[in-house]
Amino acid sequence: MKRVLLLTIVLFLFIQINAIGQNAWINEIHYDNGGTDENEMIEVVIENPGTYILSDFSVSFYNGNNGDVYDTKTLNVFTVGATIGDFTFYYYYYPENGIQNGAPDGISLNYQGSVVEGQFLSYEGVMTATGGPASGMTSVDIGVEEGSTTLSSESLQLSGTGNQYDEFIWVDPATATAGEINNNQEFGTYVPDPEPTNYPTDFAAVANALTIDITWIDAIGDQLPVGYLILASGEDNIEAPVDGTPVLDDPVLSDGTAALNIDFGVETCTFSNLLASTPYYFQIFPYSNYGEFIDYKIDGTVPAANATTAGITIINSEDFEDGLGTWTQYSVTGEQIWYQDSYGGENFAKMSGFDGGSHENEDWLISPALNLDLYDDEIFTFISAMNYSGNVLEVFYSDNYDGVSDPNAAVWIALTVELSAGSWVWTESGDVDLSEINGTNIYLAYKYTSTNSESSTWEIDNILITGMPDVGIDNPTSNCGEINIYPNPAFDEVNISMQKEDVYKLEVYSVNGKLIRSVIVDGSIFKTDISDLTKGIYFVRISLINSKNISTKKLIVF
């Protein structure tokens, strides 16, 4: 009878331990690196693993495209790593390209076929599972990722001090620690640090075309910050963060607001792809701790800065999210052509003469017609990646191509650009100066060639052509006199007043040089309805009839 009672107690305790929940979590992952993916790995931590049957735990990987599981491994096939206190590490190395590269993809840690609480995670975005233990669940994005600059010896891993998953944070790629405690990770009771003693100094914002660089000098004092939160806005209305509520990274400032978390010691960050001729405002908040313990310094005078982007217009941009977009391919020789491809969630234009073997090819990727007479200081940029031996990609412009015929019938002039040296390394072209090129039908083009013995593969992405609108902005020699536009910004009606009575020609242009409307005004005041104009920046060009002198004013429609 005593034995039965003892067995009952043991079973009861075992059931109770498992009913409380498993203190286990995904602690480290490596899924992507420059070149061929190597050392792909997943690591799991379990507290008191002796109270469980190890094969009851499993790790499932989910395809972000269809939400279903593409691989599952039980932990009894994992390698046992170190034990620290009551915590033991288990890790598993996958073959090359064994873990998908995301945008997004997911992972779940499971116990007896159910997801351990809080352990349906994803990288490079959020997904919903359609199969496996997490079916119907929405993932939690870990917020950091790997890519072409990640080394095969690095991984994403949890950092901080604690005894359970939500007391740690995921950090950017660092030296991998499979089977060992992570870099800057400690098990134990977390004692939060006080808020940082001081703010950083020399906080500044400098605009560079459509990019704003933020710099500062690290804070000093008894309590140093672990990082900084930089808040940005298109309005001078930034609100301070709240202690205990981390602000997630939001790098897209072009929509009006943004936020970046920057590690102590970095002292710089950049906001890109901004609107032209637009002021932006920034504040910096040092903080200690992470997660629910994050402690922002918000007292006193918060360092602030602002900068205004240049009046640059995007003449053409192409990221190949929709096929080849505004660019077109022309195949002169060979069966292979330029096409849209993707890898790691990024789309790009791709050309290769290899198909079961190398083939002779001549293939062009050509821009739409560009009217460069509307702009000054035009700049052309892009990124390229290549691999395998073969001819170097050529980049040209033409002022006599007709846009549809064999490009060899036109005259093409080579442009000097920086190109990828190989191994799929994405390389920036540098700022290619187009300012000396004039014409209303200018074409840019990439020319690919291969032979029957060699055929390199080339990829092109992030094409951007910018310029300053050539509309005589605030021409000081104008004989139009003083010109006022009010209200400005406006949304329904706008008034334009000239200094004297006369006959004027008024033209409204979009920021990419398109003529929106033209009208002759006899007098000194003109009122017009602009309710049909979309939100944005316009240029109002005003001249006296039969005069070459022009004044231009900017109009903001909201």
Image (cartoon, rainbow, N blue to C red):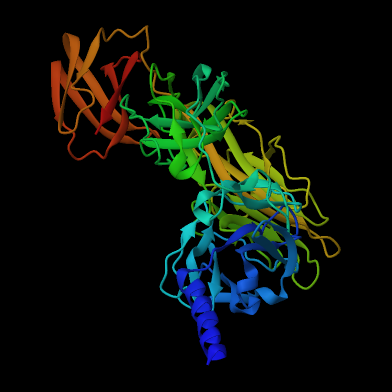
Residue shown at the point (41%, 31%) measured from the top left = 232
Residue shown at the point (77%, 57%) measured from the top left = 456
Quadrant hosting residue 267: top right
Residue shown at the point (33%, 9%) measured from the top left = 478
Front residue of 77 and 281: 77
Tag count: 0
Give residue 307's position: percent from left, percent from top.
44, 21
Quadrant hosting residue 474: top left
Give residue 388's position: percent from left, percent from top.
80, 57
Front residue of 378 and 549: 378
Give residue 63's position: percent from left, percent from top.
55, 70
Taking the image as shown, residue 512 lies to the left or right of residue 267, namely left
User: In the displayed structure, would residue 381 be above or below residue 267?
Assistant: below
Q: What is the residue that sits farthest to the front in this orientation?
A: 2
Front residue of 424 and 381: 424
Residue shown at the point (15%, 33%) measured from the top left = 492
- Residue 130 seen by the camera: yes
User: In the displayed structure, would residue 253 be above or below residue 75?
Assistant: above
Quadrant location of the C terminus in the rendered image? top left
Taking the image as shown, residue 269 lies to the left or right of residue 276, namely right
Q: What is the residue that sits farthest to the right in this orientation?
A: 453
Front residue of 286 and 370: 286
- Residue 369 seen by the camera: no
Give residue 361's position: percent from left, percent from top.
74, 61
Q: What is the residue that sits farthest to the bottom in this orientation?
A: 1
